[in-house]
Amino acid sequence: MSFTSNKAASLLMQLNGRLSTAWSRVSVQWRLHFLIQSSLAIFFVCSQYWIVEQFDTQGIQDVESQASETADGLINGLNLLMITGQISDPSNRELLVRKMSASKNVRELRVIRAEQVNTQYGPGVSNERPNDELVRKVLASGTASFTREIISGGSHVLRAVIPFVASENFRGTNCLSCHQVKSGSVNGAADIIMDLSAHEQSVSILKKWLWSGMLLFQIGVSVLISLFVNVLLKRHISQPVKQLQSTIEEIHQSGDFSLRVALADEHPDIDNIANAFNSFLNNLEIATEGMGLLAKVIESSEEAILITDADIKIVFVNSAFVHITGYSEKEVLGENPRILKSGLQDNQFYRNMWGRIKSHGSWKGEIYNRKKNGVIFPEWQSISIVKNRKGEITNYVSICIDITQRKAAEEHIKRMANYDGLTGLANRNLLNDRMSQALLSAHRQQTKLAVMYLDLDNFKDINDGYGHAVGDALLKSAAERLLGCVREGDTVARQGGDEFILLMPDIDGYGGAAKIAEKLQNSICAPFFFDVQELFVSVSIGIALYPEDGENIEALFKHADAAMYSAKQDGRNRYHFFTQKMNEVALRRINLQNNLRHALQRNEFELHFQPQLNTETGTITGAEALIRWRDPKEGLISPAEFIPIAEDSGLIVPIGKWILQRACQEAKRWHDQNFNVTISVNVSGRQFKEGDFDTVVEEALKTSGLDPKYLELEMTEGVLLREDEALCRMLDKLKAVGVKFALDDFGTGYSSLSYLKRFPIDRIKIDQSFVRDVPQDTEDGAIVDAIIYIAHGLKMEVIAEGVETIEQLNFLRTHHCCDVQGYFVSRPVPGDQVIAMFHAIQNRGICSKVN
């Protein structure tokens, strides 16, 4: 109550202070005098201004009419001169102008001839030509111009420029026929200066009369009104106001809002003020009790507000309540709030809630309510008791916040923490949680549990070739297929990239796991369709069983991963159960990857070179650069073992750059010794994805001094699957400087002829898997023959790799294969043995042995 009393006292103090100040300074009387006098002054000034303005406007319009009449008389005179044939004489025109200049208020008059009249009849005299922009504008527009100006000497004039427009009337017929122009053409204008001296003098006289007359009238009226106001104020305002002020001061000092201003019934206006003030006091007295409720609501409210009486009947709801629940105010007033019950909370919940309200005076908590349309939604609700001065409960105030969005956000965060954003599968976090529960259950019930580690084969090529959009779509489709193959209690999780993990509790040992693995393989191997594109992937699966292969999460995941890697190494598209040997392989892979990170800095890599031989001439045409890793502890490590690790880890990029630089340097050294052969360098798809690969190539060529035409870059079809504009521009740029391109392992991958047409391929390499069994295997022979035929048809060279026998060489030469490489020609040799190898091959005369 202190809040309402202080507020009311403050308002009364302000009102009392203003009345006291007004009375002490007699402000009401003098302000009224000032208002009356100001109003009279403004009225008289405005009246004078309006009268003068109307008089001036009418005078100017009269002068404009005179100018128009003068122009009309001038054109009539010109028309007469035209009819009588005297218009061509300038003196006649000047005489007419002088006569017309004698018209009333005409100070100066000129005839302006339009350009079309000058063209037809000659230029005329000088003062008939347009001499300023205003005249030219009137001639161009055909619209008269009236301008008020002050000329030298301070005289006021009106300049009128009025066009002569030829029209089809009684007078214009002559203009149209003589000037041979169309109706509406402007043949000239009258430039008239009208004297405004008489008009200005009339306005000045009017102003003087108005000022003197109205000033005297205003003074007289003001004196009479002042006398009347003084008498009226004293009788009807001063005394009643003093009484009103006295009552206000008493209320302010006592704080008693029950006092009222006495009515004299003699002064209606003051009585109205007193009545209004008494009504204000009535409302203020009532508000002192209600403002306690209002203050509590304002301090507590966040959104929807619902107020009930002591009998729990709704007496007030705000617009937020209407918006959230869908109920109108009319529909809920007088109702019990139970109309919002969702049914999700039981009776015990409400008993606890009301028990808390009665014992503590309030309750806060989360509750589910039902909207008018039946939708159930969550709210954060606060319910408080309001009591009167006697301590009796008068109202219950409920403040509700719709937390639907907050709950959705919490659910979204929870889902993000436990599910993969792309596929909707469980992520590693949720998988670990379910794995822990499954292990506890398997331990208690003595059952088996299987963990499968899946990796999609060839996904990387598709993702690089067709773009991430297709790659993501394939992953989502693959996830749906995996879910369709497992049981209801199994968990399918995405590990990341193209790797998935399956958790299968209560599995029927190796046999049960094998059946599910085969089902997964069959499902994934089915074609995927995206728009009109048909894509194929397979899956490599590693399987670890509890308790045979591990008794904790880390061991089972690690061993399933090792088994999956074994399946990859064994040719892909298969499943392997974990063995202890796989664990050793996985450990070796980890060690190789760690050592590989330092091998480049330690100069542990070296290049070997395998020559490429022309089958017709027997000459060496080139050599392929092949990397070798000579580990200080293990010795020479096969590229087949460390190159996949370099690809997966991204180390292939710096290693590939080193290969390119070293190969160009070696080739330049051969050229300096008169062996001008091409150097072939294998390039990974990861190198092309870096975006600056063309710069890397140009830098290697520039540093080594090698002619670009002697560099051949070998790439697989997986690189060309990207088929994006950036790759095309990069290849075209390198092709423009002379670099050659070879398509490696042709026939083992997608073998799309569109790549051969779209990209600047110079040579196709036949994979050794097709060469190995020719000429005995007729199918391989037919494939080799077809590849050679395609290459020649596209004006490309062709080289076969893996040639190890003279029979293979003879077959390839017979079928017009341009070049070969393989052990039959030479094994790869270190860089310091290349020159000797070249000499040895030439001395052997290999092609002379071919029949």
Image: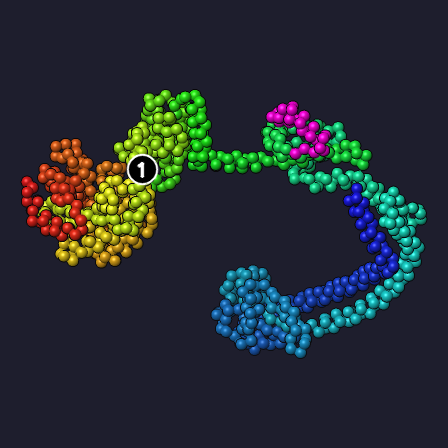
- In percent of the image, x 62 and y 31: which residue is there? 367
In this rendering, is residue 46 above or below 546?
Answer: below
Q: Nearer the viewer, residue 606 or 648?
A: 606
In front here: 509 or 194? 509
Taking the spot 65% from the left edge, 24% from the top edge, the residue there is 348
Disc 1 designates what residue? 587
- In the figure, residue 99 lies in which quadrant? bottom right
Hey, which quadrant is residue 516 in on the image? top left
Q: Is residue 175 above or below residue 233?
A: below
Circle 1 Cα neighbour tier, 10 Å, few/some/many (<14 / 14–19 / ≥20): few
Residue drawn at point x = 50 percent, y = 69 percent: 115
Q: From where the camera sits, is residue 664 visible? A: yes
Q: Quadrant of residue 757?
A: top left
Task: Give the side of residue 78 with respect to residue 603, left or right.
Answer: right
Q: What coloring was used for the rendering?
A: rainbow
Where is 727 relative to 563, above or below?
below
Residue in the foreground of this view, choosing between 258 and 540: 540
Residue at 31 percent across and 33 percent down: it is 583
Instruction: Residue 83: give x, y in percent of width and height.
Output: 56, 69
- Can residue 722 be seen at all in this image of the molecule? no
Q: Is residue 602 left or right of residue 844?
A: right
Please state which amino acid type lies under the numbered disc 1.
Answer: Leu
| x and y percentages locating residue 191 in the rendered image | 60, 71
Q: Is 459 one of the magenta-colored residues? A: no
Residue 482 higher or lower than 647, as above or below = above
Quadrant of the rendering where the N terminus is positioned: top right
Residue at disc 1, secondary structure: helix
Front-lying residue, 42 or 549: 549
Magenta residue span: 341-364
Q: Position of residue 336 (x, y in %)?
A: 70, 27
> Does the magenta segment cover residue 345?
yes
